[in-house]
Amino acid sequence: MELLKEAIENLSSQVAGLCIGQTPALDKMIETLDKIEAISSNLNAATLKTVAGAYKSYVKRMDSREITTTSPLEQGLTLLNALVKHLEKGADFIFDISDVLEILDSSFFENNLSPSAPQSKSIESKDIGLTENLETSIETPSNLEPLKLSPQLQNLTALEISAEDLQILSDFVSEAEDNLDTIEVELMELEQDPLNHEIINNIFRPFHTIKGVSGFLDLKKINKLSHSTENFLDCVRNGDFIINDIATDAILESVDLLKKLLANVKESLQNKVKPDDSNIDIEPLRVKLQQLPPLLAKDSKEPVGKILIRKGIIDDDTLDDVLEEQSRTGKRIGEILLESELVDSNDIASALMEQTGQKKYGSSSSSSTQVKVNTNKLDDLVDYAGELVIAQSMLKQQASKDPSLYQSINQLEQIVSNIQRIAMSMRMIPIHSTFTKMIRLTRDLAKKSKKDVVLEMSGEETEIDRNVVDALYEPMVHMIRNAVDHGIEKAQERINAGKPAQGTIYLRAYHKGGSIVIEIEDDGKGLDKERIFEKAVAAGLTKKEASLTDSQIFDFIIAPGFSTASTITDISGRGVGMDVVKDGIEKFRGNLDISSKKGAGTCFTISLPLTLAIIDGMLIRIGKERYVIPTISIKRSFRPDKKDCFTLKGKGEMIKERNELIPLIRMKQICNVDNDAISPWEGLVVVVESKEEKRGLFVDELLGKDEYVIKSLGGSLKNIIGFSGGAILADGKVGLILDMHGIFELAASV
């Protein structure tokens, strides 16, 4: 048994490290599976041997480049682990494993089916390693050893559940959640191209996988609902109807309900109790999925004329005139409207796309093959790479007096730099997954608010630290909600303003310096600067006589509880949200800038560091203390002339910098650190910028630019304004990293 467990552990490692197209890696997997088959024969474990054989068949097809999908390998591993663990325990509970074996290989059925096995509707499965006309519902053959799962897995109780069973269920939930996220993305693409059979199959397969694995794990409601959705999609694959808004809504409803069921299983696993889904009713949706196909016949489309009326492009009288002409001439409605110049060709094209369920949601590209790695291990690797950089810097400083070590130290520095770069790149992932979630959000919000809104994306392959990607989700949700609810106008209002009836939200990502920039822009009515200022004065946030820039006025909408909405909707308008956006962004050393033009739209610009582990900074000295200023905040440094230094009443010390007076900040004002130099012209001034505001920081010396590994200041100091962390310097001492936005706030308050 130990040899069997060791072999499956080796197989798990081989799957985790697999890259598509690597023949040697696949050959090693086949060798391991041969070993598992041989051990299974010695143990008289027929089912285990059959599963290993089906698994091997799938790997061989990958080796011959017939298939490239890796998901069945992970599902097969779940089944192999379950078989081994419960073979070891000798439990006597039986589950249907045919669906999982079907995912791996059809030869299982050809070699082992009894003549009395029930037949059912065939499916085309060549993309997942199955032959055509494969049965979708087959009983486990009687001549095979039944799958034995532990009583703990069959009857989860508050008393006991084994760690192995917990892991099996946990793996399934994690994989199923990933599959459902993939389905949402594919559905949005399918709305653009409803006849694309490849996308339809890409949606069908995850439901099929969830159905199969949930069946042998005895998760009945998940199994039933995924099976019903699979049948619904099978009707699409057979051409019974074309995907449209109604069909998409039904599938998304199924995705949401499955996520709810999976969340219930996850919560039960944490509490080690039996999942209780009695309060989740799946039957209304299952009935809906059964009744919809006949109603979604190919000819059940909304007429183009009705679509144009709904979008406010023509009125009822115009349509009546066009229909009358159509009865005389036999021409198409669109043709008549174009000839009479009543509508633009783009409007006709948009209506035809909507009639077939197509909508433009921006470009998308297929995801590259990725290997799953435990995130804790990845974080540890990055941390140790950072420690290696610090140790190398210390060694370099200590060895600077010994020329014989110079070459070796330089070589070490290059190796350490490469290790650090690779470790950091492993934690970088495309922002694509977060962006694509906004497609679903935009679609749902547009329907709820009865507006015609399209989302256009660019730069979704831009890479960013995975922790920052997670942090971006909530701020982006709030801003998309505000854009749809408050920014984009109703169709008729837009037409009256000379705009297209369809509103557009632009979602962009790109690198700029050492930061990633996310822009969320809409072409709506824009922010009302005067109204915002009035509300801010009424709320006591500013004085009526204050002279503020547009950017400073727009920043008031970020204040907690601030809202200019005249009505509260179930989407937004309660004055909460934007302060959450600000806190979420600043938590990761980011900035939020707002620009807007009344009647033309609003743009929210989020700037975040590419990584949370390393910062590109300038080391400065002020008196006996050393600080790190992020280079992205630095505009220039200079030694001012005496004639360019002023003291203004009510404004304090000012420095003339390129014909502009900017306030001077002394660290003595903030943390009681004295400069060696007394007057600005005796030291240096570093011009720093935050949120379009510039200040001059009075320093004694610039010590050099470098990359610094960011260290947390600890729980008791993490919320101190003006400092975002610490860095271990080459001599082993700590230098504080300045948060310039916080420094500006502190300087303004003294």
Image (cartoon, helix red, strand yellow):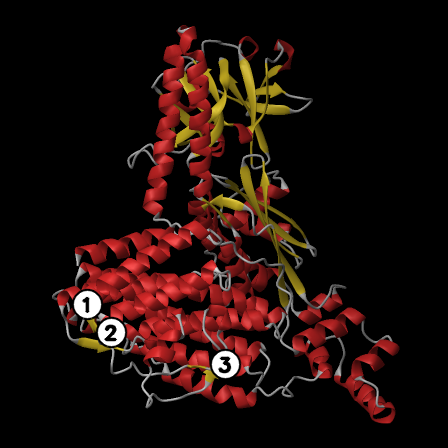
Viewer-proximal residue, 653 or 34? 34
Say which quarter of the image contains residue 576. Answer: bottom left
Which residue is under mark 2? 276
Residue 109, x across and y down, in percent: 36, 79
Which one is earlier in the sequence, the residue at label 3 or at label 2? 3
Asked if marks 3 and 2 touch (Cβ < 8 Å), the reply is: no
Which residue is under mark 3? 234
Q: Spatial distance from mark 2 to mark 1, Cα to Cα?
A: 9 Å
* Circle 2: residue type: Asp
Q: Residue at x 36, y 70 (%)?
A: 260
Assign a secondary structure to mark 3: helix
Residue 681, x across and y down, in percent: 57, 10
**One can see residue 175 in this view:** no
Circle 3 or circle 2, nearest the eye: 3
From this view, report whether residue 732 is shown above or below residue 283: above
Viewer-proximal residue, 345 or 22? 22
Q: Which quarter of the rendered picture does the C terminus lie within?
A: top left
Q: Residue at x 28, y 75 (%)?
A: 277
Say which quarter of the image contains residue 641. Answer: top right
Which residue is under mark 1? 273
Residue 39, x across and y down, in percent: 22, 61
Label 3 CA crowd tier, 10 Å (few <14, some 14–19, many 20+): some
* Circle 3: residue type: Asp
